Image (tube, grey):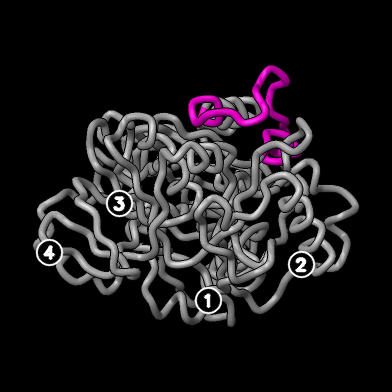
Amino acid sequence: MEDMAADKASEAGQTATLDRDSREPRVCVIGAGSSGITACQKLLERRVDFDCYEMSTETGGIWRYQNDSGRSAAYRSLHINTSRQMMAYAAYPMPDDYPDYPDHFQIAAYFDDFVDHFGFRDRIQFATEVISVKPVSTGDSSTQWEVTVKPRDGEERTETYTDVIVANGHHWNPRWPEPAFPGSDTFTGEQIHAHYYREPSELAGKRVLVLGIGNSATDISVESSRVAEATFLAMRRGAWIVPKYIAGVPTDRVTAGPLTRAPLFIQSFVLWLTLRLTVGKLTDYGLPKPDHMPLHAHPTVSSDLITRLGHGDITVKPNIDHFDEDNVVFEDGSSEKIDIVVYCTGYQITFPFLDDEILRRFAEPRRQHRRAVSGGQCVRLNHEAQRPVGGPSSPTVLRCPLERA
């Protein structure tokens, strides 16, 4: 009887321990890019147990040029399009000797310094891919997560976590035109996505068509205009072109401050007036008039595009209508002989380790940062210290029933 009582007590103790341990948060962070590492820093600060899995052998994500994960979209001349003061982590500012708009080499070095400063490099498991993330019921109305990972030179294994932060980035799975333009399958020239562009030497001496009016499109068309035989910039719609400086000050610092607390229509009007005074009418440069006010869609940041247009080094075209062997015919009926088309058509937001059903059940498409993920609760991370860097790789949110500050 005493043995039976001891066994029952032992079983009860094991159950209590299991329940207590299951309530202790253990977090999986997917990705050691700009958002993944700041999530790690906040978890470390709050003494929350976590593991971070990074597909490549270094931090930085898309900011790591020629990243050995094969997923970086950085081209050789890439610089940030927000100022270093606005882009930096509040908990760890960028060095004072950095320029206003650092290049990707400096940003990658900054991320390395951030990780080493806070001392959690040993918590990042590099060269390790996350294969799947699946919710598992614990029997007490809460959900945990089974995360299967595979080291580059090792065997798959599965770990269990109470929370998952998805920070795998959004700029690695190229979106091509859908449906494809008629005749693109028989076009005799070359077609690439901006994701695979690296250096202007790829465009030297060619007749280049860049499709798009985002930041990558303007950067690539400007580079092309310096080395190509001819450069054409085609687009479906207009966009507001924002210079990097206004009155010698980075634009995002000029427009920050009290103005950001004003109603959107006031912010929009002030920016419209500022751009009218500093840039002028976009139609004067051959660009289509935007069909929206500033701040109602993502602006394009470029100080070089307007100059190259004014020099006649870039010719603006409407959207592609169809291809005809080595010619591209545009929607206005004009055509040009083209050697290479660079599609700057964005990226698909993809989570290869999550089933579609899980996304439907748990994903929250907006408010994409500042939260850890849990089946039972979301831990809100400090807003200031986790300011998203550069925007593209903010962690994706899984919706949770409860939140606590």
Q: Residue at x 14, y 50 (%)?
A: 189
- Name the residue: 41% across, 69% down: 134
Q: Along the polypeptide, which appears first: circle 1 or circle 3?
A: 3
Mark found first going from the N terminus, 4 or 2:
4
Amino acid type of disc 2?
Arg
How dense is the environment of label 1, judged by Cα within 10 Å: few (below 14), some, or many (20 and up)? some
Residue 109, relative to residue 395: is it above or below?
A: above
**Nearest-to-viewer mark from 1 and 3:** 3
Amino acid type of the residue that numbered disc 3 sits on in the rendered structure:
His
* Location of mark 1 (residue): 362
Front of the two marks 3 and 4: 4
Q: From the image, tell me which residue sits under label 3.
A: 193
Relative image position of residue 11 (x, y in whole percent): 54, 69
Picture layout, residue 104 above or below residue 210: above
Q: Are marks 4 and 2 in contact (CB under 8 Å)?
A: no
Q: What label does residue 185 carry, if any?
A: 4
Disc on res. 404 = 2
Q: Residue at x 38, y 42 (%)?
A: 72
User: What residue occupies the far top of the structure in this picture?
Assistant: 97
